[in-house]
Amino acid sequence: MNSDLASIETATDFDIRFPEAEAGHDQDAEWFEFTVEGERRRLKVHDYAALYDVPGLYEALVYETLACRSPDRVADLLVLAVSDGQRSMEDLRALDLGAGNGIVAERLAERGVSAAWGADLLPEAKSAAERDRPEAYDGYLVGDFTAFDDEDLAGLRAFDPNLLVVVAALGYGDIPPSVFAAAWNEIADDGLVAFTIKETFLSFEADRSGFAWLVHQLRDRRLLQVDARLRFRHRVSIGGEPLHYVAVVGRKFGAIPPELLETCNAMAIDEAADGDADSA
Ligand SMILES: C[S@@+](CC[C@H](N)C(=O)[O-])C[C@H]1O[C@@H](n2cnc3c(N)ncnc32)[C@H](O)[C@@H]1O
């Protein structure tokens, strides 16, 4: 077992197996088989709702078998960036976007972050966080962040987050730029931002997710100052190949203006149309 993950223990042996012939597939096509309560089942690695419904399966698959390091890497990079600034980890109140079942909040708490709210598209993620890590979050929003109204956001605004953290959840049909931007605008203007993203999603030549463009815009308009950046092995693929991500920690200097939000929203619509065409 990876020593970074010593505190993640799963009591159940799920007998996880991967298909050898399809080992070259992209991340969002990967699938696996496992056994639970005597039954052999098959799931996609990215089928989060079904994964979260089985206690311990997400940890066994993503953290033990595929050796995911992202929560520890981004939390360590945050510690490094904070140690060079005016703030302490204890001052940070996190909004964990794409929070899943709470591993990121747990890693941040281990490093001193005093409080966190979670947000995720899936009700199964919130249920799993409450089941597996009931102490992880002070509040948890479920749904599309771009669709939340003032009433939905009242509790989060009272919490007044000063750190946006997004780990292993940007792009790939998960969080689009529009959702990231909406969450960004709920963070205090002198707050911090910490996220991981597949390195090709930050490359202008390769990116179709819109994040390369958005991060460029944020830096160009002086809304984001990058304080620390690390290329690291996020996890291995089901074929054992390393998958590299980039962790970024920076400071937020202002809200994303309406015209930039509109472009993000338009990109999300284009992407959805692409997805419909792909699946047709
Ligand atoms: C790979 S999991 C990462 C979970 C957690 N951050 C971690 O590192 O363990 C990606 C998460 O992003 C969530 N997600 C996907 N699309 C989303 C969206 N549009 N808004 C919020 N969460 C989303 C998924 O439901 C899932 O819980």
Image (cartoon, helix red, strand yellow):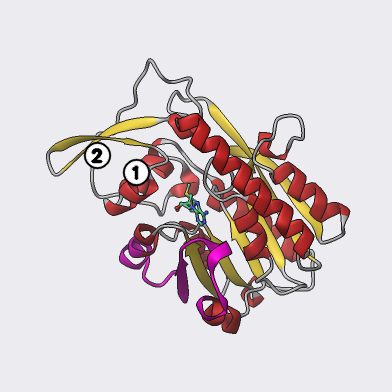
Does 225 sit above or below residue 1?
below
- Residue found 76% across the figure and 49% down from its top: 215
The answer, for residue 236, to whether it is visible in the render is: no
- Residue found 24% across the figure and 39% down from its top: 14
Residue 203, image x, y percentages: 74, 35
Query: If you read the primary sequence from the N terminus, does the residue marked by circle 1 or circle 2 appear first?
Result: 2
* Crowd tier of the residue under label 1, counting other residues whose Cα lies within 10 Å: few below 14, some 14–19, many 20 or above: many
Left/right placement of residue 62 relative to residue 273 reads left
Instruction: Determine which residue is flagged by label 1.
Output: 60
For the C terminus, the quadrant is top left
Q: Is mark 2 within 8 Å of ligand 1?
A: no
Q: Residue furthest left?
A: 38
**Foreground residue among 60 and 40:** 40
Residue 211, image x, y percentages: 69, 45
Residue 77, image x, y percentages: 67, 54
State if disc 2 and disc 1 touch (CB < 8 Å): yes
Instruction: Determine which residue is flagged by label 2.
Output: 14
The amino acid type found where label 1 is placed reads Ala
The magenta span reads 127-152
Left/right placement of residue 229 relative to residue 30 reads right
The amino acid type found where label 2 is placed reads Phe
Does 250 sit above or below residue 254?
above
Residue 115, image x, y percentages: 54, 75
Q: Would residue 200 be counted in the magenta stretch? A: no
